């Protein structure tokens, strides 16, 4: 696509907000039962793993809140009138990491996630990026909320947006 990302030294968000940045929302994250979701988390992550292998990619970054809620069959209340919660997700060939405060997940939500899914604090996405130095990391080109100046995101792979291709049975 001929796109080049260039790192900058200044954190523009910090420059604007300074110490006045509001805290992240902290609504409870709850399970969305598979009987309503239509597809299990395991099936969704399995499909994404196949897409990563076929694309010769190492990871896929999710930043769209509705996509994260759908993929993990979870719902929250961080955005008025939307059943989403503030998070990022990093999908790899053998599992996933959900970046949101782990204490937010109610017991049913945590129990509904496969053992291959780790839940770590929201800010952990920055360290996770560093582990992918020199790797092929994909993201949704319609999503532009990246938490740091990450210049190793090399391409878009819209076909990996499984829920968009398959109608996203429930959001």
Image (spheres, rainbow, N blue to C red):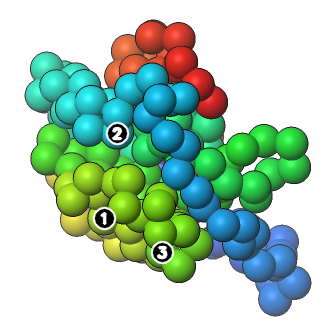
Q: What kind of element bears circle 3?
A: helix
**Label for residue 102?**
3
- Disc 3 crowd, CA 10 A, few/some/many (<14, 14-19, 20+): some
**Along the line of sight, the residue nearer the viewer: 116 or 161:** 116
Q: Quadrant of the N terminus?
A: top left
Q: Position of residue 120 (x, y in %)?
A: 40, 72
User: Picture quarter containing residue 85?
Assistant: bottom right
Q: Position of residue 79 (x, y in %)?
A: 80, 51
Instruction: Determine whether label 2 and label 1 are within 8 Å by CB.
Output: no
Q: CA distance from mark 3 to mark 2?
A: 18 Å
Instruction: Determine whether label 3 and label 1 are within 8 Å by CB.
Output: no
Label 2 vs 1, first from the N-terminus:
2
Query: Does residue 166 appear in this view?
Result: yes
**Label for residue 118?**
1
Q: Is residue 9 above or below residue 116?
A: below
- Disc 2 crowd, CA 10 A, few/some/many (<14, 14-19, 20+): many
Label 3 vs 1, first from the N-terminus:
3
Q: Position of residue 12 (x, y in %)?
A: 71, 66
**Label for residue 130?**
none
Q: Residue at the location (31% across, 65% down)?
A: 118
Q: Is residue 33 above or below residue 80?
A: above
Residue denoted by label 2: 41
User: Picture quarter containing residue 157?
Assistant: top left
Q: Quadrant of the C terminus?
A: top right
Q: Residue at the location (83% across, 71% down)?
A: 16
Q: What kind of element bears circle 2?
A: helix
Q: Residue at the location (47% across, 61% down)?
A: 108
- Left or right: residue 94 versus residue 13 is left
- Left or right: residue 13 versus residue 42 is right
């Amino acid at each position: 696509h001929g796109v080049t990302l260039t790192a900058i030294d200044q954190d523009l968000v910090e420059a604007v907000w300074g110490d006045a940045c509001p805290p992240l929302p902290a609504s409870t994250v709850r399970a969305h039962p598979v009987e309503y979701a239509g597809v299990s988390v395991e099936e969704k992550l399995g499909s994404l793993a196949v897409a990563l292998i076929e694309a010769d990619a190492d990871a896929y970054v999710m930043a769209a809140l509705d996509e994260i809620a759908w993929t993990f069959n979870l719902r929250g209340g961080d955005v008025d009138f939307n059943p989403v919660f503030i998070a990022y997700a990093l999908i790899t060939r053998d599992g996933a990491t959900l970046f949101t405060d782990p204490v937010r997940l109610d017991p049913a939500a945590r129990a509904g996630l496969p053992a291959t899914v780790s839940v770590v604090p929201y800010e952990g996405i920055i360290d996770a990026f560093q582990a992918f130095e020199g790797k092929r990391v994909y993201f949704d080109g319609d999503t532009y909320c990246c938490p740091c100046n990450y210049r190793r995101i090399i391409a878009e792979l819209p076909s990996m947006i499984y829920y968009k291709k398959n109608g996203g049975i429930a959001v």
